[in-house]
Image: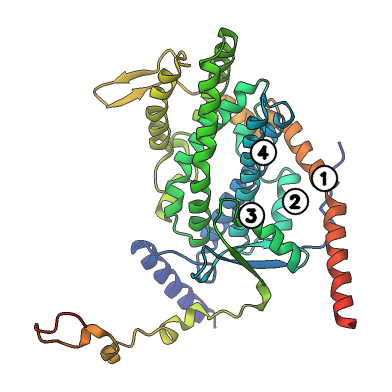
Amino acid sequence: MNAHLPDKTPPMPLWEVFVRSKQGLDHKHCGSLHAADAQMALRMARDVYTRRMEGVSIWVVPSGAITASQPEEQSVDFDPMADKIYRHPTFYELPDAVRHM
Amino acid sequence: MSSHAIDVTAIEQARFDERLRADRKIEAQDWMPPAYRRTLIRQISQHAHSEIVGMLPEGNWVTRAPSLKRKAILLAKIQDEAGHGLYLYSAAETLGSSREEMVDALHAGRARYSSIFNYPTPTWADIGAIGWLVDGAAIMNQVPLCRCSYGPYARAMIRICKEESFHQRQGFDIMLSLCRGTPEQKAMAQAALERWWWPVLMMFGPSDAESSHSAQSMQWGIKRISNDDLRQKFIDATVPQIELLGLRLPDPLLVWNADRGHYDHGPIDWDEFRRVLDGHGPCNRERLATRVAAHDNGAWVREAALAHAAKRNSTAKSA
């Protein structure tokens, strides 16, 4: 038997897939896949991620087009703003007489 | 310079340990120990390979399924397996391993896949036994993986587990039909049960005492339940199903132990397990050769897709 030769086909671009599970809801990231172009990525996303009515709409985005925040900046970017607790409704004490607000 | 590098690693390691202790997920961009990354790439890619190679024993029966209904169901199941392979390859890719590297490692025989797929499917009852027992054992293994510490792997497993229970039920449904059929059909079901029982018990891996990766994987939150505990859980769940089918138990030592509250079972032939793992099972060569041929024969499709994309790109630019 011949030794196995590595595949010479160039790699397919990577796409991130977002699926809207039903009308009125957000598109949500559900995974990624490789495809030659956007049309083929859409078609594959349909087969890979929505075989059981998981969605009514799909977005595919080239993975390279996404700019992500860095984990090491997490504490700065997503500071819980403990000094601005007045942004939360629970900061305010209401008289018991106010039932719904 | 180097002492600074060590400090940074120590801080990152402490942060990683703290995250595991708090049972929070590790995500792709987060720092992780190199050995954690390597272990995950090995495990997730092997898992992906298993899904892909797992299509082959079943593909054998697509054209010979006994009815159009069974054929449609089998096709849907096999399509799911391909999807599961893709979810898992994607999860492994988030760790920095390329799809090409992983596929190449499988085809060159450097990467492993589940040994269970190196057994043949000589009768239609084997398709029933695979769904019922092999997928049943896979579910036992996979449900705890939904809580794995690595986020992308855990999310892929949640998706897979949702789809997997259809696989087990369709297999059991095949067995049920055969067991309610003619004596010959029931005998076929019995033979398939006996063929698959021991290899399926081996799917859970060596006993905890001998499993080389178990302890570290437990510590990392990759593995949540031990091999022996999962195997026991599978046996306890499956024996009543065997009885319900009206089949004979495949192991004379399989008896209820009231003291333990579990079934006892006979010794597992780990020499056979290692033989198959080392490439000497009944179908190892055939499976790999079929897989490599399928990939090679599909090369022109991948090339055509890329050529088509390039052409459309250039037309769009010039327009």
**Residue at the spot of label 3:** A48
Asked if B45 appears above or below B229 in the picture, the reply is below
Identify the disc placed on residue A4. Answer: 1
C-alpha distance separating marks 3 and 2: 22 Å
Give the crowd class for mark 4: few <14, some 14-19, many >=20 residues within 10 Å: some
Looking at the figure, which quarter contains the N terminus of chain B? Answer: bottom right
Percent coordinates x, y for residue A21 in the rendering: 52, 62
Residue located at (56% from left, 8% from top):
B183
Look at label 3 and name its amino acid. Answer: Val
Do callouts 1 and 2 point to residues on the same chain?
A: no
Judge depth for marks 3 and 1 and give the one in front: 3
Percent coordinates x, y for residue B208 in the rendering: 42, 37
Identify the disc placed on residue B104. Answer: 2
Residue located at (77% from left, 67% from top):
A37
Give the number of marks.
4
Percent coordinates x, y for residue B181 in the rendering: 55, 14
Image quarter for residue B280?
top right
Look at label 1 and name its amino acid. Answer: His
Identify the disc placed on residue B75. Answer: 4
Do callouts 3 and 2 point to residues on the same chain?
A: no
Residue located at (71% from left, 63% from top):
A41
Do callouts 3 and 4 point to residues on the same chain?
A: no
Q: Chain of mark 3?
A: A
Do callouts 3 and 1 point to residues on the same chain?
A: yes
C-alpha distance separating marks 1 and 2: 9 Å
The answer to whether any part of residue B266 appears in the image is no
C-alpha distance separating marks 3 and 4: 14 Å
Q: Earlier in the sequence, mark 3 or mark 1?
A: 1
Give the crowd class for mark 3: few <14, some 14-19, many >=20 residues within 10 Å: some
Q: Chain of mark 2?
A: B
Q: Chain of mark 1?
A: A
Give the crowd class for mark 1: few <14, some 14-19, many >=20 residues within 10 Å: few
